[in-house]
Image: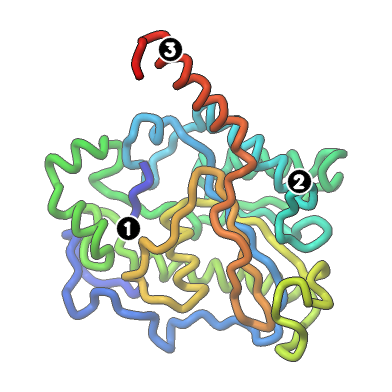
């Protein structure tokens, strides 16, 4: 189970943060610098279902393979991204992405490889898309909670878990990462991604149309895919939009959900958040199986 937690390092690893530091917004020195003329698109894809998720255990940095359902989810999201302009079209630029970045953990790597394979196929983009792992995108470390069922942690460390879920800058898993520390590694990875996109594209201007449907160059800007984890994506989005870390729970990514963020004249704009319609066939199968089980049991 991904029930994650961490920008500026602080001493101690008890899982509690001094009150004065809780919820602090990003300082001027740490604020992400987005080029004023950057025109680009970032696609975030959460990894597919893993065996530890099936078991409802905290994952963190633990390695766990995709489940049988997870492998099917990865194939479906891969096919969707390989043919993004088939109806209903995703709000993406024309042409292939310049790169697929991903967490080095196996569940993210397996999902990224599926996307790479589908994009390279003849009915995809028909060319190899560079794929590379980035260790700075690894999931939030969950320390002593990793591998344990959520029910067990609720029973043995319930107060800390409840604080983490309500005020995530004030508590975290014993031996795990603070949101402040997570942001300190995610921000440089995000800055590198933006720099790569800036190099690949053409500078834009605030004087060009900023509303979807009116943009002269909407189809030309470079884009990249990032395959990772719900916890890290929460921190990445807060960093990109310059929001305080205590807003951690405002974002959510379903398994193999697709989110799209445009950068328009240096300003991030949410185009789509957590799209999952490409997984509808799996959801229909689950609903049918539940209906059949009720029929066998006689349940109303």
> x, y (%) of residue 136?
49, 60
Considering the image in quadrants, where does the N terminus appear? Answer: top left
Q: Residue furthest front?
A: 300
20 shown above or below 175: below
Dot 3 crowding, Cα within 10 Å, few <14, some 14–19, many 20+: few
Which of the two labelled residues, at mark 2 and mark 3, occupies the earlier sequence position?
2
- Horizontally, is 249 left or right of 260 in the view? left
List the residue tagged with mark 1: 5
Q: Secondary structure at mark 1?
A: loop
Residue 299: x and y, percent? 34, 16
Residue 42 lies in quadrant:
bottom right
**CA distance separating discs 1 and 2:** 32 Å
| Residue that badge 3 annotates | 295
- Mark 2 residue element: helix
Badge number at residue 82: 2
Counting residues from the start of the chain, the first of labels 1 and 2 encountered is 1
For label 3, the SS is: helix
Between residues 23 and 105, which one lies in front from this camera angle? 23
Q: Residue at x 46, y 20 (%)?
A: 291
**Residue 162 bears which disc, if any?**
none
């Amino acid at each position: 189970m991904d029930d994650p937690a961490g920008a500026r390092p602080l001493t101690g690893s008890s899982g509690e943060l001094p009150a004065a530091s809780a919820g602090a917004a990003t300082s001027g020195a740490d604020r992400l610098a987005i080029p004023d003329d950057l025109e680009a698109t970032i696609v975030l894809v959460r990894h597919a279902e893993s065996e530890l998720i099936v078991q409802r255990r905290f994952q963190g940095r633990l390695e766990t393979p995709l489940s049988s359902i997870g492998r099917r989810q990865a194939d479906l999201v891969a096919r969707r991204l390989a043919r993004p302009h088939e109806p209903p079209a995703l709000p993406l630029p024309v042409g292939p992405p310049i790169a697929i970045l991903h967490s080095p953990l196996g569940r993210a790597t397996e999902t990224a490889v599926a996307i790479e394979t589908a994009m390279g196929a003849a009915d995809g983009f028909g060319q190899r898309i560079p794929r590379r792992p980035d260790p700075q995108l690894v999931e939030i470390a969950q320390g002593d909670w990793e591998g344990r069922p959520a029910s067990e942690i609720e029973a043995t460390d319930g107060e800390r878990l409840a604080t983490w879920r309500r005020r995530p800058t004030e508590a975290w898993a014993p031996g795990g990462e603070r949101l402040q520390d997570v942001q300190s590694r995610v921000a440089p990875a995000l800055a590198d991604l933006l720099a790569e996109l800036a190099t690949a594209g053409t500078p834009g201007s605030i004087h060009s149309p900023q509303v979807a449907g009116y943009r002269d160059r909407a189809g030309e800007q470079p884009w990249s895919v990032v395959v990772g984890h719900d916890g890290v994506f929460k921190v990445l989005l807060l960093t990109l939009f310059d929001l305080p870390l205590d807003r951690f729970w405002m974002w959510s990514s379903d398994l193999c959900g697709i989110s799209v963020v445009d950068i328009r004249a240096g300003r991030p704009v949410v185009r789509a958040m957590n799209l999952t319609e490409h997984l509808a066939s799996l959801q229909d199968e689950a609903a049918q199986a539940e209906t059949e089980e009720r029929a066998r049991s006689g349940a109303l």
